[in-house]
Amino acid sequence: MKPLTLRCLALLALLVLSGLAQAQFSAQIMPPRFEDRAKPGDVYREVIEISNIAPVPLRLTVATADWSLNAEGGVAFQASLAEDSCRPWTALEATEIEVPPNGKRRFRFEVRVPQDAGSRQCRFAVMFEGEPTPVPGVAVPVAGRIGIIVYLDVGDARADLRVVGSGVVEEAGRPMPMLRIQNAGTAHGRLEGFIDATDATGERWTLTPSGNPILPGATRDIPLYPVVNDDEPVVLAFPMKVSGKLEWRGRAIDIDVSADR
């Protein structure tokens, strides 16, 4: 996974800053998410690595947060406990840290899964927030914030993904085939792999799904992107016949649909 690079997030909105303001809060955090499994009664421990790429110290406050996805797939974080939150199971190494100039810091967290947790998915975020920094043109100081997402499948929690429709969506101004995926399981799923497609002109394509998560109980449209060279033009003619298998965490789903506008 590529590291997440912070260039000052004004609350949850990304702002590209310049000069000293940028240097005062600029970091790389790795990994961007954790996807793992634990048994009831386990203590799950992991490490987040923070690299300060600025020549000045980086001071961060750290906390956990619950989160949700909106219809467009955007993440909304909340500090208050959500219903059935698993954040009371979590412990952080510290609530305030400092990363030296051009240095690194390893940050530890753990999840103590109760013995009676049953089968479910524990989802939360570890939030890192910088000190407020004056920004030219902004009336109030800006505090950068980023969340590292944790998905922890407890017990027998698993995704159960099903194709319930297909169609076409606009991606960057271009029409792309999509699969409407329903998750009837108790954990999130994220489709991977390659499938074959033939468009209305007889042109053959290889498609790969977006890596968007499908949360338990959710139905989400997953775009399928052609696998091409960067300089190869992509002109798709609909309807497209799409077939093959896609996978998620050791399970597979058969695809045999027609994607049309």
Image: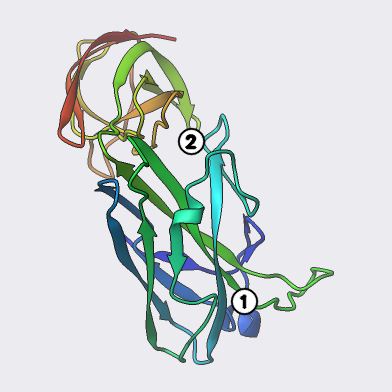
Disc 1 to disc 2, how far (Cα)?
27 Å
Q: In this view, which residue lies farthest toward the front?
A: 116
Residue 167 shows in this picture: yes
Position of 207 with respect to 55 (left or right) is left
Q: Nearer the viewer, residue 156 or 4?
A: 156
Q: Is residue 129 above or below residue 97?
A: above
For the point 62% across and 82% down, the residue is 19
Residue occupied by mark 2 = 172
Residue 216 in the image: x percent, y percent? Answer: 41, 28
Q: Nearer the viewer, residue 260 or 161?
A: 161
For the point 23% across and 42% down, the residue is 229
Residue 147 in the image: x percent, y percent? Answer: 50, 58
Q: Is residue 238 above or below residue 106?
A: above
Amino acid bearing label 1: Ser
Residue 200 shows in this picture: no
* Label disc, if present, on residue 18 of the rendered structure: 1
Amino acid bearing label 2: Ala
Picture quarter with the C terminus: top left
Q: In this view, which residue lies farthest toward the right?
A: 139
Question: Element type at marker 1?
Answer: loop
Residue 126 in the image: x percent, y percent? Answer: 48, 61
Q: Residues at badges 1 and 2 in contact (C-beta under 8 Å)?
A: no
